[in-house]
Image (cartoon, grey):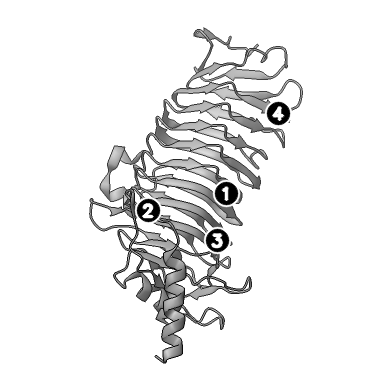
């Protein structure tokens, strides 16, 4: 390496070292591995897989793209990128693209201790409509994922498979089959200000996925448990069901917007293996003549729900299980129907049942 090249590398490292990043409350070391220092050809469109892998396995805790890149720049990969435990990655909003049917970025572990600590920030994943998954979060624990966009994926944009105690903030999806799949004992994760949009099958699905690796740990009987969603948007696309809680317990949804209406089903479904999940101030938009909510589980509850866009006299909630609804005193005046069927119950406020006629 020439003296000039050495000087350029040192300048990049000094620039990146000024970034504030924390793991467990402690500042990162100023040693920063810059992808370009490991042979990336970001400006040529050549395969950057080995350069990114070398940077991630260089022994430093903070990996980043070099600053001051052009808007047209992107990294090209042909293999899944695996993020090691304790390593953080800042993509600096330079897209990582692929033309292969792969998982683009995987944060996983082969042992029960999990892939712990660290952050993934400012990342754009472009699957080229070929990638099978954009971001796979397997047995990851105490990690932070912030400012991430996943687009152009033939399968699931984001999978959280048995991951626990992670923070997901400002995630965005576009052009995928499933925007977010939360499965196999994924628990105590927090999702804040995310937009799970433009999906063809499901925008959000919670449940078991026995074909994925996280199922082998059998945590919480592979039910997603005690996850929290705050200020989430699930809309656009032509998903058959927008939000599908096929199974799961004690999950909380606050200020979620569920819009667009299912193509062949309800906007929101809670399956028979879902129980004690809570929706606080959910907005459920109507459309296409479909039911707003189909509730088949036990003890799932809704506080101050908002149903808009439904025709006069529409059934906005069907209960085939036990459902609690509070803060919805205008349901009769609005002529919107809450309908128990098949032995289901709807309890309003102080355990007041809705008659079987739904009126």
Q: Which residue is mark 1?
A: 201
Quadrant containing the N terminus is bottom left
Viewport quadrant of the C terminus: top right
**Residue 305 lies in quadrant:** top right
Residue lying farthest right?
A: 312
* Dot in front, 4 or 1: 4
Instruction: Identify the residue under disc 2.
Output: 22
Disc 4 or 1, which lies upstream in sequence? 1
Classify mark 3: residues with Cα within 10 Å, few (<14), some (14-19) or many (20+). Answer: many
- Whether residue 139 sits left or right of residue 20 in the image: it is left
Which one is earlier in the sequence, the residue at label 3 or at label 4? 3
The correct choice, above or below, for 339 with respect to 142 in the image is: above
Q: Can the viewer see residue 102?
A: no
For residue 149, say whether it is visible.
yes
**Nearest to the observer: residue 41 or residue 341:** 41
Q: Earlier in the sequence, mark 3 or mark 2?
A: 2
Q: Which mark is residue 87?
A: none
Marks counted in the figure total 4
Q: Give the foreground label among 1 and 2.
A: 2
Q: Relative to 299, is 235 above or below? A: below
Q: Helix, strand or loop at disc 3? A: loop
* Residue 94 coordinates in the image, percent (x, y): 55, 68
Q: Secondary structure at mark 4?
A: strand
Pointer 3 and pointer 1: residues touching (CB < 8 Å)? Answer: no
Query: Gap in Å between the C-alphas at discs 3 and 4?
Result: 31 Å
Q: Please tell me the numbered disc located at residue 153.
A: 3
Q: CA distance from mark 3 to mark 2?
A: 31 Å
């Amino acid at each position: 390496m020439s003296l000039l090249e050495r000087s350029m590398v040192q300048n990049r490292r000094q620039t990146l070292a000024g970034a504030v990043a924390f793991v467990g409350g402690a500042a990162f070391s100023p040693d920063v591995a810059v992808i370009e220092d490991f042979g990336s050809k970001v400006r040529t469109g050549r395969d950057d897989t080995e350069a990114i892998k070398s940077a991630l396995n260089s022994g430093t805790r903070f990996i980043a793209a070099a600053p001051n890149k052009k808007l047209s720049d992107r990294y090209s990969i042909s293999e899944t990128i695996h993020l090691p435990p304790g390593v953080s990655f800042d993509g600096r909003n330079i897209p990582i693209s692929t033309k292969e049917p792969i998982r683009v970025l995987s944060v996983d572990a082969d042992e029960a201790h999990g892939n712990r600590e660290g952050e993934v920030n400012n990342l754009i994943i472009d699957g080229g409509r070929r990638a099978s998954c954009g971001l796979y979060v397997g047995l990851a624990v105490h990690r932070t994922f912030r400012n991430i966009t996943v687009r152009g994926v033939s399968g699931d944009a984001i999978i959280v498979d048995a991951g626990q105690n992670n923070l997901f903030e400002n995630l965005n999806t576009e052009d995928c089959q499933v925007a977010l799949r939360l499965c196999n004992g994924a628990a105590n994760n927090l999702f804040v200000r995310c937009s799970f949009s433009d999906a063809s099958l499901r925008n959000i699905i919670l449940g078991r996925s026995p074909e994925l690796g996280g199922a082998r740990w059998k945590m919480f009987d592979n039910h997603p448990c005690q996850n929290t969603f705050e200020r989430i948007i699930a809309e656009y696309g032509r998903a058959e069901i927008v939000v599908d809680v096929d199974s799961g317990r004690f999950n909380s949804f606050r200020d979620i917007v569920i819009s667009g209406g299912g193509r062949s089903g309800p906007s929101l479904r809670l399956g028979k293996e879902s129980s004690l999940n809570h929706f606080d101030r959910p907005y459920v938009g109507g459309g296409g003549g479909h039911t707003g909510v189909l509730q088949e589980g036990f003890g799932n509850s809704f506080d101050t729900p908002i149903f808009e866009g439904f025709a006069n006299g529409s059934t906005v909630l069907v209960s085939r299980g036990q459902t609690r609804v509070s803060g919805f005193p205008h349901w009769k005046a609005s002529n919107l129907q809450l309908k128990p069927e098949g032995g289901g119950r709807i309890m309003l406020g102080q355990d007041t049942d809705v008659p079987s006629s739904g009126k």
